[in-house]
Image (cartoon, rainbow, N blue to C red):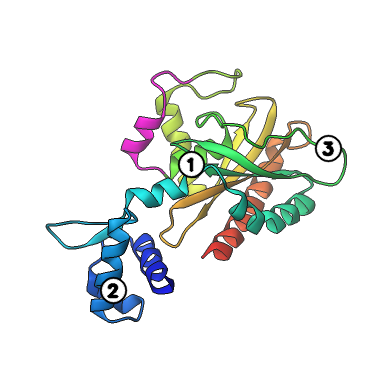
């Protein structure tokens, strides 16, 4: 099982489809063992083999596992970093995860003081939140077109509903590494950054936010850097 899981992780971490020989060398096992274990993983849908090239990619069953209802294990692992970031910034810090071509909040750490509104379990509008915009920015263009509705809903006067303007905003997100939201979904402001896997694909989004009188436009760059630091630490923890 240990060797099979090492192979599965190696396939998932590859930027391009991998051959049996490549995977065997990376996982330090002989080719025949790698071939046998990959065949077992393929039979369970965890990897897929291209018949023409003989190379492997992640299979459909891996995506089913990744979008499972229960994100508790990952949230528990990242919880200390959420709490530390909430304490250092004095703002609410939430963790969002990918779920059926969208995002949902799965954990929240509040700063010291009165209780904050609980966002756990809420679906996130992708075009109108900093978490959603990070998710969209790292998504291939064809997939982005598939998940966005034909008409973008306006939640406040500040919501971006023009596709060209949204594309320019997503380009800024890719340039800066984090996204910002100024009253686009409700009247709170916030920043978000992506937690990535070994292949630099987003697996979760960390979001720092609060009411607009406290999280002002001038604070967003500082909070953006804090979100980037937290996301980087979380990525290392999950590596």
Q: Which residues are magenta?
A: 139-152
Q: Nearer the viewer, mark 1 or mark 2?
A: 2
Task: Please check the rendered image and state whether residue 187 is part of the magenta-colored stretch, yes or no.
Answer: no
Question: What residue do we see at 43% from left, 36% from top?
Answer: 101
Question: Circle 2 is placed at which residue position?
Answer: 34
On screen, residue 156 above or below 60: above
Q: Quadrant of residue 208?
A: top right
- Say which label, 1 or 2, has the lower sequence index: 2
Position above or below: 173 against 73: above
Q: Residue at x 35, y 31 (%)?
A: 145
Neighbourhood count class around disc 3 (C-alpha, 10 Å): few under 14, some 14–19, many 20 upward: few
Residue under label 3: 115
**Comparing labels 1 and 3, the label whose residue is closer to the camera:** 3
- How far across and how far down the image is residue 188, in percent? 70, 30
Q: Which residue is mark 1?
A: 135
Front label number (2 vs 3): 2
Which of the marked residues, 2 or 3, is nearer the chain's N terminus? Answer: 2
Horizontal side, residue 23 vs residue 132: left or right: left
Relative image position of residue 63 (x, y in whole percent): 40, 48
Label 2 CA crowd tier, 10 Å (few <14, some 14–19, many 20+): many
- The residue tagged with tag 3: helix, strand or loop? loop
Up-down relation of residue 227 to residue 161 (above or below): below
Residue furthest toward the left? 52
Q: Which image quadrant is residue 207 in?
A: top right
Mark drawn on residue 174: none
Determine the secondary structure under disc 2: helix
Queried whether the magenta region covers residue 148, the answer comes back as: yes
């Amino acid at each position: 099982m240990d060797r099979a899981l090492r192979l599965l992780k190696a396939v998932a971490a590859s930027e391009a489809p991998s051959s049996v020989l490549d995977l065997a060398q990376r996982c330090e096992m002989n080719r025949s063992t790698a071939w046998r274990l990959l065949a077992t993983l393929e039979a369970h849908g965890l990897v897929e083999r291209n018949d023409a090239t003989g190379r492997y990619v992640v299979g459909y069953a891996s995506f089913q596992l990744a979008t499972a209802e229960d994100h508790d294990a990952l949230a528990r692992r990242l919880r200390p970093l959420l709490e530390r970031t909430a304490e250092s910034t004095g703002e609410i810090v939430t963790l969002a995860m990918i779920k059926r071509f969208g995002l949902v909040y799965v954990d929240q750490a509040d700063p010291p003081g009165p209780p904050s509104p609980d966002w756990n379990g809420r679906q996130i509008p992708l075009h109108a939140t900093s978490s959603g915009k990070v998710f969209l920015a790292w998504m291939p263009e064809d997939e982005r077109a598939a998940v966005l509705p034909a008409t973008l809903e306006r939640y406040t006067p500040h919501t971006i509903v023009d596709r060209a303007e949204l594309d320019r905003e997503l380009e800024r997100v890719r340039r800066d590494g984090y996204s910002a939201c100024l009253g686009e979904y409700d009247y709170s402001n916030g920043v978000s950054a992506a937690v990535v896997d070994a292949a630099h694909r987003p697996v979760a989004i960390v979001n720092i936010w609060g009411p607009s009188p406290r999280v002002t436009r001038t604070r967003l760059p500082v909070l953006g850097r804090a979100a980037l630091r937290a996301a980087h630490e979380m990525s290392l923890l999950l590596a």
